[in-house]
Structure formats: C-alpha cells, structure tokens
Image: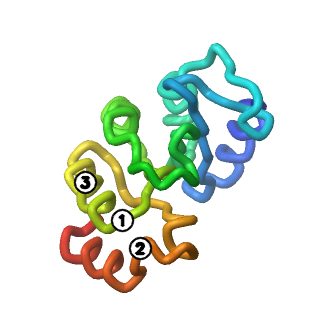
Amino acid sequence: LNPELVLNASRCFPGQIVIGIDARNGMVAIEGWTKTTQVKAVDLAKKFEDSGVAAINFTDIYRDGMQTGPNIEETKRLAEKISIPVFASGGVSTINDIKNLIPLKDFGVAGVIVGKALYSGGLNLKEAIKISKQKRL
C-alpha cells in the first residue's frame, strides 16, 4: 500500500491512471491478498478521487476466480460514494452476472473485468459484448 506513489503518478498523468483496489469485507487487501489492512476500500478510493485518477478497478477478493458472481452490494457501495468510474472485478462467471451489474451503471459502475470465465468457457465473449453494448455498460 503506497498511496503517495499513486497520488504523485496521477498528478503527473491526470486522467491516465486506473488504480486497483482489492478488498476483503470492505477492507483493502495487500501483498498478494495475504494481508488485510485497516483501511476501508471506500476511504482509499476517496483519497484518490480528486487526484486525477481516471477510474478504479474494484476487486472483491473473496470472489475473484471463484466464479460465484460479483459482489454487487460492495461494488455499488463504493461506486455511489465516489465521482470517478468504477470497474467491477471478481466472481463474474455467466452472462447473468453481467446483466446483474448493468443497473449499477446508474451509480458509477462503468464496466466489468472478466477473467477466468472467459478461458474456462463459462462466458461467451461475443454475447457479453452484445449485452453490454445494448445496455451501455
């Protein structure tokens, strides 16, 4: 966790830095998810909000790679408390997961990052793109 490095980079390159916030139970996780800090994910996001950061990639680490569906509530909670776009990450496994994220665009969720579901075959990329374009996520 080195917020000063990110703050300096985002000031030097405004609108060009996307930061990742990995969280467990709403608290920032670091060092390859081996340690959970006492820093709330939303507080860290707010710290970067006015520094020129373009967006935040928010990962609920309990769900990442598990294909159990994204943490809709935590993602929404973070997105509605900041003014910069949030990308949902972790747990997406089906087209229904993407459909469930679409209503969050009204709260600041700008997109979704999909990993394991693509290479395991659980999610069809063409279908995901089609749904996202139709609903503008």
Amino acid residing under circle 1: Thr
Front residue of 33 and 137? 33
- Closer to the chain start, of discs 1 and 2, is 1
SS of the residue at dot 1?
A: loop
Q: CA distance from mark 1 to mark 3?
A: 10 Å
- Closer to the chain start, of discs 1 and 3, is 1
Q: Are marks 2 and 3 in contact (CB under 8 Å)?
A: no
- Image quadrant assignment for residue 75: top left
Q: CA distance from mark 2 to mark 3?
A: 14 Å
> In which quadrant of the rendered image does the C terminus lie?
bottom left
Residue 6 position (above or below residue 91): above
**For mark 3, what is the residue?**
100
Residue 3 position (above or below residue 68): above
Residue 136 position (above or below residue 106): below
- Closer to the chain start, of discs 2 and 3, is 3
Looking at the rendered structure, which numbered label has been put on residue 41? none
The residue most toward the bottom is 126
Question: How many residues crowd mark 3 within 10 Å: few (<14), some (14–19), many (20+)?
Answer: few
Tag in front: 2 or 3: 2
Q: In the picture provided, is 125 more to the left or to the right than 36?
A: left
> Where residue 113 sits in the image (x, y, percent)?
49, 61
Give the residue drawn at x 32%, y 46%: 108
Give the residue drawn at x 39%, y 60%: 111
Front residue of 136 and 75? 75
Q: CA distance from mark 1 to mark 2?
A: 5 Å
Give the residue drawn at x 50%, y 25%: 26
**For mark 2, what is the residue?**
123
Amino acid residing under circle 2: Leu
Q: Are marks 1 and 2 in contact (CB under 8 Å)?
A: yes
Question: How many residues crowd mark 2 within 10 Å: few (<14), some (14–19), many (20+)?
Answer: many
Looking at the rendered structure, which numbered label has been put on residue 94? 1
Tag in front: 1 or 3: 1
